[in-house]
Image (cartoon, grey):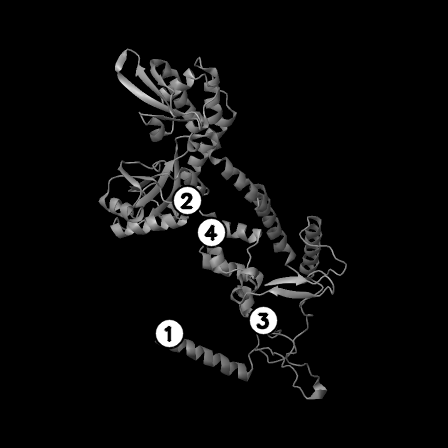
């Protein structure tokens, strides 16, 4: 529905209405289930994350929120929203982004003996721009059947927005090969064992919860290693070791440190080949190269002088993404001072994840930072400490509740979370308050004139008089009254009966 305003009369009117985009008005308690009314606050996300980390189930956490807020109808989200939030935060932070960049080659491997149930753990991994292992995801399967692997691959493909890898590396399992051909029909399959780096973190005695926690530690370790290598690549300074200073510096500015070392090694060895033939009559230009004192070993290098693209008959650039010795020899012949962009594969460059980092930085500005979450947890503990003593009396509860509400309102206005209006009222000015305490009616006290029976006073069991008990009777050594004699005789008789039986 689109609403416009007439310029002359200033009246509003509906200019466009699409019935398919509307629904019947939700009534009563069903309004809370509309998406526009469901929201999980930052404080609730922090509590949800903390409870989930110690193993509390989602339904129990939902019941806890309902108890805190005073009822299920006051919870502003559903259990499915909590599942979605956990799925968004779950485990492998950045796995989707890594797969979007480095998912051209996927290692699909199953490891054994990593949990006490002996269930195979399938790890989806790859290689990042530092030539280090990066983990895209993991799954625990009950059996190594063809159907299980097909289901796992389809779920993985769905999580990665349908992007299929170009090449898949497995350990040669027949069921895996069939599953790969079924789910990834266009991918090239290679049989090679790729062992996940789980031995340092995961042991066979771990259950599911311990496995998930320690597997996350393994992923955190890999990501910390990647961050360290990023720092060394961006802020380190290499020691130049070749005579081709400009080309070496250009490689350092483009490649990560690990890839630069390989690039520099090729640059050193480019003096071992020489250009014996050159044809620039047509585009692309053709160069024939031979190895030093080995005329039988020759290669062809082609350069498109319009797009400045290079290709070599050795196919090293197409295979590994690093320019070969022959292409670099042609670059030296052409007196190039920087490496062409066509020879820098983005997955090996420093800028491989630069866009992802920028996007994550923009997203994190809207989400609570680590410092904010730390403060939130510490302040929650202080509030709990205050609550334990403030709730001991009704008067203290009212005083500190009003004080917290006024302080919260002041801070919300200060940080622009609530607009300041003249007719603003706090939560205590409206709504239902606690009722006034009254005494229960009970049984009315009536005077003797009203006909109520007076309270019976106790008598001494020894002398039968009022005003004292048997322990304080002045006639303690005197003979008991007739009624007391009968009661004592009855007690003695019962004792003799018990002894006889």
Q: Which mark is residue 69?
A: none
Residue 359 visible in this rendered orientation of the protein: yes
Q: Secondary structure at mark 3?
A: helix
Q: Which residue is outermost to the right?
A: 422
Q: Residues within 10 Å of mark 3 (few under 14, many from 20)?
A: few
- Image coordinates of residue 301 in percent, x first then y, are 35, 22
Estimate the spatial distance between the alpha carbons at disc 3 and disc 2, rounded to whole Å.
70 Å
The single residue placed furthest to the left in the displayed view is: 174
Distance between the alpha carbons at the discs numbered 4 and 3: 72 Å
**Residue placed under numbered mark 3 in the picture:** 471
Asked if the residue under mark 3 is in contact with the one under mark 4, i.e. CB atoms within 8 Å, the reply is: no
Q: Earlier in the sequence, mark 1 or mark 3?
A: 3
Picture coordinates of residue 127, whole percent (x, y): 38, 34
Query: Residue at label 1?
Result: 499
Circle nearer the N terminus (2, 4): 4
Camera-side residue: 297 or 155?
297
Badge 2 density bin: few <14, some 14–19, many ≥20, Cα 10 Å:
some
* Residue 466 locus on image (x, y percent): 64, 79
Q: Nearer the viewer, residue 387 or 408?
A: 408
| Residue drawn at (45%, 23%) of the image | 339
Nearer the camera: disc 3 or disc 2: 2
For label 4, the residue is 86
Farthest front residue? 281
Q: CA distance from mark 1 to mark 2?
A: 69 Å
């Amino acid at each position: 529905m689109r609403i416009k305003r007439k310029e002359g009369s200033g009246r509003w009117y509906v200019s466009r209405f699409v019935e398919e985009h509307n629904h019947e008005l939700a009534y009563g308690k069903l309004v809370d289930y509309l998406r526009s009314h469901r929201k999980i606050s930052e404080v609730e996300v922090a509590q949800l994350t903390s409870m989930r980390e110690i193993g509390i189930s989602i339904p129990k956490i939902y019941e806890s929120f309902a108890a805190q807020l005073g009822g299920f109808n006051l919870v502003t989200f559903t259990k499915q929203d909590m599942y979605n939030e956990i799925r968004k935060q779950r485990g492998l932070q950045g796995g989707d982004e890594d797969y979007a960049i480095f998912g051209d080659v996927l290692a699909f491997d199953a490891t054994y003996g990593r949990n006490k149930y002996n269930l195979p753990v399938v790890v989806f991994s790859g290689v990042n721009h530092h030539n280090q292992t990066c983990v895209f995801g993991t799954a625990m399967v009950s059996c190594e059947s063809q159907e299980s692997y097909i289901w796992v691959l389809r779920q993985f493909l769905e999580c990665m927005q349908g992007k299929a890898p170009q090449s898949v590396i497995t350990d040669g399992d027949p069921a895996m090969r069939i599953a790969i051909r079924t789910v990834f029909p266009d991918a090239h399959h290679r049989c090679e064992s790729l062992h996940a780096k789980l031995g340092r973190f995961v042991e066979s005695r771990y259950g599911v919860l311990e496995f998930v926690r320690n597997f996350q530690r393994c992923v955190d370790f890999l990501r910390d290693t990647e961050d360290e290598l990023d720092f060394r690549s961006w802020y380190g300074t290499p020691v130049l070791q070749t005579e081709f200073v400009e080309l070496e510096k250009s490689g350092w500015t483009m490649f990560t440190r690990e890839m630069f070392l390989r690039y520099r090694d090729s640059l050193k060895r480019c003096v071992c080949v020489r250009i014996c033939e050159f044809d620039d009559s047509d585009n692309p230009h053709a160069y024939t190269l031979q190895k030093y004192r080995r005329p039988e070993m020759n290669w062809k290098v082609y350069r498109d002088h319009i797009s400045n693209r290079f290709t070599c008959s050795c196919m090293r650039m197409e295979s590994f993404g690093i320019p070969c010795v022959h292409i670099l020899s042609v670059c030296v012949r052409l007196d190039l001072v920087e490496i062409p962009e066509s020879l820098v594969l983005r997955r090996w460059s420093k800028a491989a994840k630069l866009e992802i980092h920028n996007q994550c930085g923009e997203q994190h500005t809207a989400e609570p930072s680590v410092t904010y979450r730390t403060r939130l947890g510490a302040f929650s503990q202080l509030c709990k400490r205050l609550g334990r003593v403030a709730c001991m009396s009704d008067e203290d509860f009212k005083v500190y509740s009003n004080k917290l509400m006024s302080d919260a309102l002041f801070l919300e206005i200060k940080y622009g979370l609530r607009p300041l209006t003249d007719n603003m009222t706090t939560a205590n000015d409206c709504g239902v308050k606690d009722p006034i305490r009254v005494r229960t009616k009970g049984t009315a006290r009536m005077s003797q004139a009203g006909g109520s029976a007076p309270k019976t006073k106790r008598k001494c069991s020894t002398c039968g008089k009022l005003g004292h008990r048997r322990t304080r009777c002045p006639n303690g050594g005197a003979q008991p009254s007739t009624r007391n004699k009968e009661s004592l005789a009855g007690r003695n008789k019962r004792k003799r009966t018990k002894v006889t039986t």
